Image (cartoon, grey):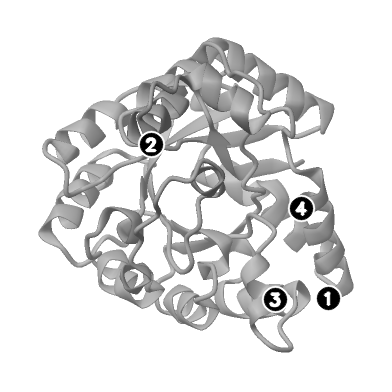
Amino acid sequence: MINDVHCHFFSTGFFGALATQRGGGDTPASLCTELGWDDPGTPEALADRWIEELDRHEVGRAALIASVPGDEGAVAAAVARHPARLVGFFINDPSADGAADRVDGTLSLPGMRAICLFPAMHGYTLQSDAVRAVVDVVASHRGAAVFVQCGALSVGVRNKLGLPTPFNPQLGDPAALTGLAGTYPSVPFIVPHFGAGRLREALTLSETCPNVYLDTSSSNGWIAETPDLTLESVFLSALAAAGASRLLFGTDSSFFPRGWQRPIYERQMEALASIGATPDDVARIRGGNFDRLFPVAGGV
């Protein structure tokens, strides 16, 4: 079983937000043409395409991330169309007006299961009262989780379109999550990309807080910036710190026609085989932990 905890839902609304930021009369369709990417169409059409893609690669379930604030309705529509296959995540900026109410309303929708915090992008600290207010709401929704982008942050589509990326990397320290995760022990916190260049801090965090999970997604290009570090050694360290029960496989797949990133899956499975991970541990990482955190409603 393969379940992917990290896929971006690049909807028409997502491209519309980028077009607004860019100005100059751009439209979602014109941006897709410029990028050489397929126009996503309606949320339902994009959901159907994701299911076709998952089927083609024999992937059971996936988490789809609404990748700009305010686009959670598109993912909610996709999840409603395929509730047994898709789980909804959405970006929330806690510093925005009405953030907590928006979280409450969205997590009340079927299949919407996690908020995504990007402190370096939106310019807030994880210790802020605003963050605690939205996590309070998450804690009130049984089974909901918090995804926190830490470490290096680069949004490829913004770079391709020449949009500014004024991110503050100092706000993406995994260590800053320790107090929050400790305050809400019943809430799962997911740190993607093994901490995205902040591996040591992410490992310490996962050792300290048993409700912190590490996702394995993307090509993890940050590894190349650290001498003598390999994906194999990262997996070994993560298994030692968090255990196989708190690692979640992901690819960071996003746009079409590229679709689901099978080479990332194959590279990670190769690394796990190389370090001698047991079949049970691989099964947990590849899909079992996902199903435990995000069971299908009603056991469908």
Measured in 3D between alpha carbons, the distance from the residue under mark 1 to the one under mark 3, in whole angstroms, is 19 Å
- In the displayed structure image, the side of residue 268 where residue 128 appears, left or right: left
Image-quadrant location for residue 241: bottom right
Q: Secondary structure under badge 4?
A: helix
**Sequence-first disc among 4 and 3:** 3
Q: Amino acid at mark 1?
A: Ile
C-alpha gap between disc 1 and disc 2: 37 Å
Could you classify mark 3 by the number of other residues whose Cα lies within 10 Å: few (under 14), some (14-19), or many (20 or more)? Answer: few
First along the sequence among labels 1 and 3: 3
Residue 182, percent from left and from top: 29, 69
Secondary structure under tag 1 reads loop
Residue 266 rendering spot, x and y as whole percentages: 84, 53
Please provide percent x and percent y for residue 49: 68, 18
* Residue under the image location 66 percent in, 22 percent down: 38
Kindly identify which residue carries mark 3.
224
Q: Kindly check if marks 1 and 2 are in contact, taking CB atoms under 8 A apart as contact.
A: no
Separation (CA) of disc 4 from disc 1: 17 Å
* Residue 190 visible from this viewpoint: yes
The picture quadrant where one finds residue 83 is top right
| Label 4 sits on residue | 264
Residue 138's label in the rendered image is: none
Disc 4 to disc 3: CB gap under 8 Å: no
Does residue 130 appear to the left or right of 72 in the view shown?
left
11 over 283 or under it: above or below: above
Inspect this view and state whether residue 111 appears.
no
Q: Amino acid at mark 4?
A: Ile
Query: Separation of disc 2 and disc 4 at Cα?
Result: 24 Å
Which numbered disc, 2 or 4, marks the residue that appears first in the sequence? 2
- Read off the residue under disc 2: 68
Q: Amino acid at mark 3?
A: Ala
